[in-house]
Image (spheres, coloured by chain):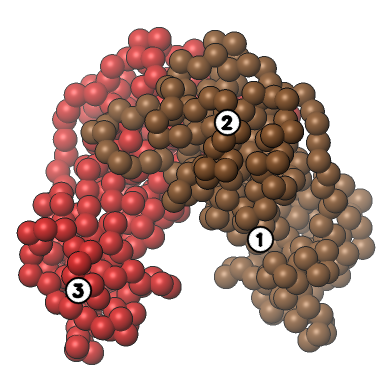
Chain colours: A red, B brown
Amino acid sequence: MVGKSQIKYIRSLQQKKHRKASGLFVAEGVKLVNELLLSGYSPRFLYTTDPEILPENVPPFEVVKEADLIRMSGLRSPNKVLAVFPIPESSPFIGEGWILALDSVQDPGNLGTIIRLCDWFGIPNLVCSEDTVDCYNPKVLQATMGSIARVNLFYTPLSEFLSNSKKPVYGAFMNGESAYGVRWPDSGVLVMGNEAHGISGEVGDHIHKKVSIPQFGRVSAESLNVATATAILLSELRRNPGN
Amino acid sequence: MVGKSQIKYIRSLQQKKHRKASGLFVAEGVKLVNELLLSGYSPRFLYTTDPEILPENVPPFEVVKEADLIRMSGLRSPNKVLAVFPIPESSPFIGEGWILALDSVQDPGNLGTIIRLCDWFGIPNLVCSEDTVDCYNPKVLQATMGSIARVNLFYTPLSEFLSNSKKPVYGAFMNGESAYGVRWPDSGVLVMGNEAHGISGEVGDHIHKKVSIPQFGRVSAESLNVATATAILLSELRRNPGN
């Protein structure tokens, strides 16, 4: 049985301020927790209703009743395992290849989906403006399906990051050049903007080339969702490098 | 002031069985309701806290207090307008060009995003298996951002539909030919599968060509989210027809 104060403590980690204060985050569900364990994340606490579902050579864990798991969980339907991990240190990176940068993406599902896309398209580095939603938000983690373990995230003032970058900077705009005709280099930064307002003026000043996804339906003022637009642009820059 | 029984009736339309019984659905928020009104949808009831936000030549409406809107609403943060519309009749279609088909897509956000993609990429017809999530589910409607007014949806037994179709049928699989190398014809059906299980065996029997989105990261058993995969495949079949 898990004590009341421990349950309360774990539940408090649903909120960013408590994650920040403690340096811990909660991961739930077999898929996500196992991906983190297999990627070398070392849990502070690990609870399961069914030890069979854990990978081999797992760190010490506690078997709990479903009722306890429900009390600890932030999910509507808790799924067999809950772990508390230290938030890993992230560091600025200078690397080869492409970097994806997000300017104030707010929706947790969008960020989680974008992390999963980075994993799929082999983009190891994701830079987020400081007002982008926290990647340890439980809804972000669920949407990553474990990909968070394989993508390096870094929160930083985005304009400053871009002004110091030596890579060419591409940004998604409604009125840019067709992404289908771009000669994508082997290395660069691709910036995606906020769901409602796109890329901010301050960040936009650092963008060398504006790109757009052509619209084929009746042309309207509509835009694509930021996660689907990211999917298409990452696919473009990978499908035919150098065009 | 809106009567108690009316509030209860409107709230009941959050559930599919009540939508089916009444033939009505609820749309909320300025963007969605205005798109439907401008597309010629005729509301059975129309409530707003602020008549200024409605388009010109709007049908009769009732100005309500915010407290009443909150009571009627299925949203956490109701947004100025709520309308009840008759569910339009959909009919089987035979048309030119591409048709998107969904085999048991379950997540409302995914269906809503896919409807928005159909609108962007000029795919007027979307066929859904009968166990695909209901498009008048409020979460689907929110995610469409109004695009539902411009896409014709049709729920039908999918295998039967495909076996009667004269168009070539493409399907998204993990082990298909690279989508980047496909010579997409001007007309066809593209089938996308369930979030967890992909395309079912029964539907798969009607697919002429399996296509995949290449993976560029460390190759794993992971897949892309169905909405992002749809985004990339619709972009592919539009970007360079006939390759």
Label disc, if present, on residue B207 of the rendered structure: 2
Q: Is residue A121 left or right of residue B208?
A: left
Q: Say which residue label 1 marks.
A: B137
Q: Tell me what residue is drawn at x 57 percent, y 25 percent.
A: B208
Under circle 1, the secondary element is: loop
- Label 3 residue SS: strand
- Between label 1 and label 2, give the one nearer the viewer: 2
- Of circles 3 and 2, the one toward us is 2
- Which one is nearer the viewer's eye here, A189 or B160? B160
> Mark 3: which amino acid?
Tyr
Q: Could you confirm whether marks 3 and 1 are on the same chain?
A: no
Tell me what residue is drawn at x 23 percent, y 33 percent.
Answer: B218
Say if B65 sits above or below A221 in the image: below
* Same-subunit check for callouts 1 and 2: yes
Secondary structure, mark 2, is: loop
Quarter of the image where the N terminus of chain B is located:
bottom right
Q: Is residue A163 visible?
A: no
Classed neighbour count for the residue bearing mark 3: other residues with Cα under 10 Å, few (<14), some (14–19), many (≥20): many
Residue A79 coordinates in the image, percent (x, y): 33, 69
Residue count near mark 2 (Cα–Cα under 10 Å), binned few <14, some 14–19, many ≥20:
many
Chain of the residue where label 3 is placed in the rendered structure: A
Residue topped by disc 3:
A47
Q: CA distance from mark 3 to mark 1?
A: 35 Å
Locate residue A162, reporting x and y percent: 29, 31
Q: Quadrant of residue A83?
A: bottom left
Please report the residue visible at 55 percent of the width from the left and 55 percent of the height from the top.
B106
Looking at the picture, how far across and down is residue A134, in whole percent? 32, 56
